Amino acid sequence: MLEIGDKAPAFTALDQDGKKISLSDFKGKQVVLYFYPKDMTPGCTVEACAFRDGHGALQKAGAVVLGVSKDPVPSHKKFSDKFSLPFSLLADEDLKIMKAYGAWGEKSLYGRKFMGTLRVTYIINSNGKIKAVFKKVKPAGHDREILALL
């Protein structure tokens, strides 16, 4: 997992509209990069809708929100359309972004261990360095935690 002060790894991925999005597209802006397990699941929907509802305040604070999961573009499109999400959801089917950011790892459910997406959020400052790291994110109210640090 990356730490505060580390250089944010570069990436390029397709968003829900099939548009190529790169971290370098946001040079000079703060980026809220959040990793979530799966489109349309309860916790992920709560988190995405919180970012949607707080999007205006996050933009006023100079931040761009990007969500990342291993779901494919069509799944992101349905999720984004259903919940009117005003930010990009990036498809990381090959797990390259998640692995670069330490958001892919061992999880445990009912005593069973397996590999999966860790719910992690990074704030990347305008110079491309990690400004804050949120590990084991609780979806409800997470947008307010982020806003407090911008």
Image: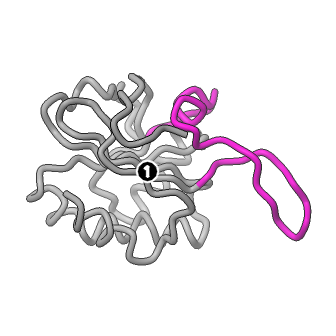
> Residue 135 in the image: x percent, y percent?
52, 57
> Residue 48 in the image: x percent, y percent?
42, 63
Residue at point 57%, 62% (across, down): 136
Look at mark 1 in the image and give the residue it sits on: 34
**Mark 1 belongs to which amino acid?**
Tyr
For label 1, count other residues whose C-alpha is less than 10 Å away and answer few (under 14), some (14-19) or many (20+): many
Q: Quadrant of the C terminus?
A: bottom left
- For residue 21, which quarter of the picture? top left
Which span of residues is magenta-colored? 90-118
> Residue 69 in the image: x percent, y percent?
55, 45
Given the current orientation, which residue lies at the most extreme bottom position? 140
Q: In which quarter of the image is the N terminus?
A: top right
Residue at point 72%, 47% (across, down): 116
Please state which of residues 121 and 79 is positioned toward the viewer in this rendering.
Answer: 121
Q: Is residue 90 above or below residue 12?
A: below
Q: In this view, does 22 lie above or below 122?
A: above
